Image (cartoon, helix red, strand yellow):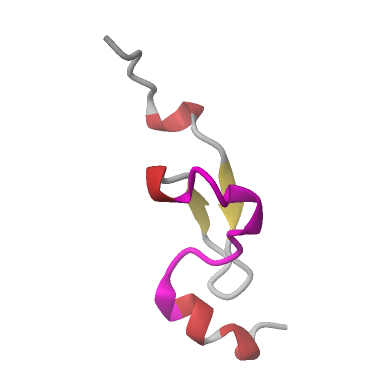
Amino acid sequence: MARVRSKSDLPTKICPVCERPFTWRKKWAKCWDNVKFCSERCRRRKSQAC
């Protein structure tokens, strides 16, 4: 059986648009280094980020 990880053990990043922390997701496993935004909404609003 796989070991269950608690959410606090997962890596986090800060979204440059909303400035909120977001946590690693399984769908980002292969591209975590390239993930910059927490959501599709923030990705679309990236031009408003400083």
Q: How many marks?
A: 0
Residue furthest top as drawn: 1
Indicate whether 36 appears above or below 4.
below
Residue at x 40% of width, y 49% of height: 27
Farthest residue, direction front: 30
The residue lying furthest to the right in this view is 50
Whole-percent x and y of residue 13? 60, 51
Q: Is residue 30 above or below residue 34?
A: above
Horizontal side of residue 5 vs 28, given as left or right: left
Q: Point out the image quarter for the N terminus.
A: top left
Identify the residue shown where x is 65% and y is 51%. 33
Q: Position of residue 41 (x, y in %)?
A: 42, 79
Q: Where residue 24 sits in the image (x, y, percent)? A: 48, 44
Quadrant of the image containing the C terminus = bottom right
Q: Is residue 42 above or below residue 28?
A: below
**x and y, in percent, of residue 34 in the image:** 64, 58
The furthest residue to the left: 1
Q: Is residue 13 left or right of residue 7?
A: right
Indicate the quadrant where residue 7 lies. top left
Instruction: Look at the image and give the residue range highlighted in magenta.
Output: 28-41
Identified at 59% across, 83% down, the residue is 46
36 magenta-colored: yes
Question: Does the magenta run of residues contain 5?
Answer: no
